[in-house]
Image: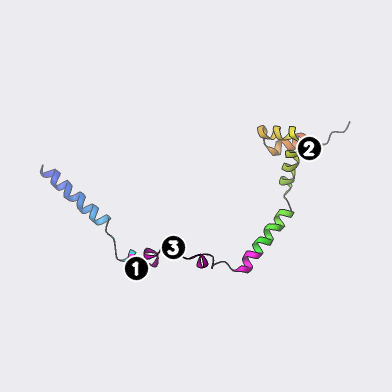
Amino acid sequence: MRALIILTLLAVLVMAATCYESHESMESYEYLNPFINRRRANDFMQAGTRLEAISQERIRERIKAPQERQREMCEDYYPCELYAFRHGYAAAYRHYFGRRRTK
């Protein structure tokens, strides 16, 4: 019985030591108001940077990677697309369009 009381007191002391709310955690601004308004949410990005990023995205859409072009060719040809579902688009493109057959 004495061991149970000592164990309970020890558990209470450990809990009090680990669950203590320090004053430092209440000093930050986020503790009182964790949300910011919509205007301040995107202040870290300048308008010029955003416009430049949008234009870069448009350029990337116009200039496609060779793998993307190959995949689109394979998607347009139904047997190639079925083959791609089983073996992957790279293997399907090689199988149907990789080497040109001349006879």
- Disc 2/disc 1 C-alpha distance (Å): 66 Å
- Disc 3/disc 2 C-alpha distance (Å): 55 Å
Side of 36 relative to 69 (left or right): left
Q: Secondary structure at mark 2?
A: helix
The total of numbered circles placed on residues is: 3
- Identity, as a three-letter code, of the amino acid under mark 2: Phe
Of pointers 1 and 3, the one earlier in the residue sequence: 1
Q: Residue furthest left?
A: 2
Q: Secondary structure at mark 3?
A: loop
- Identity, as a three-letter code, of the amino acid under mark 3: Phe
Query: Dot 2 corresponds to which residue?
Result: 97
Among the 4 quarters of the image, the one containing residue 97: top right
Question: Does the magenta-highlighted stretch encompass residue 54?
Answer: no
Query: Dot 1 corresponds to which residue?
Result: 27
Of pointers 2 and 1, the one earlier in the residue sequence: 1
**Which of the two marks, 3 or 2, is nearer to us in this view?**
3
- Identity, as a three-letter code, of the amino acid under mark 1: Glu
Q: According to the image, what is the colour scheme of the structure?
A: rainbow
The residue carrying pointer 3 sits among few (fewer than 14), some (14 to 19) or many (20 or more) residues within 10 Å by Cα, namely few
Side of 39 relative to 12 (left or right): right
Q: Which residues are magenta?
A: 26-51
**Which of the two marks, 1 or 3, is nearer to us in this view?**
3
Q: Which mark is residue 35?
A: 3
Q: Foreground: 59 or 92?
A: 59
User: Measured from the top left, where is residue 55 in percent x and y?
Assistant: 69, 61
Q: Which residue is rendered at x = 64% and y = 62% of the image?
A: 53
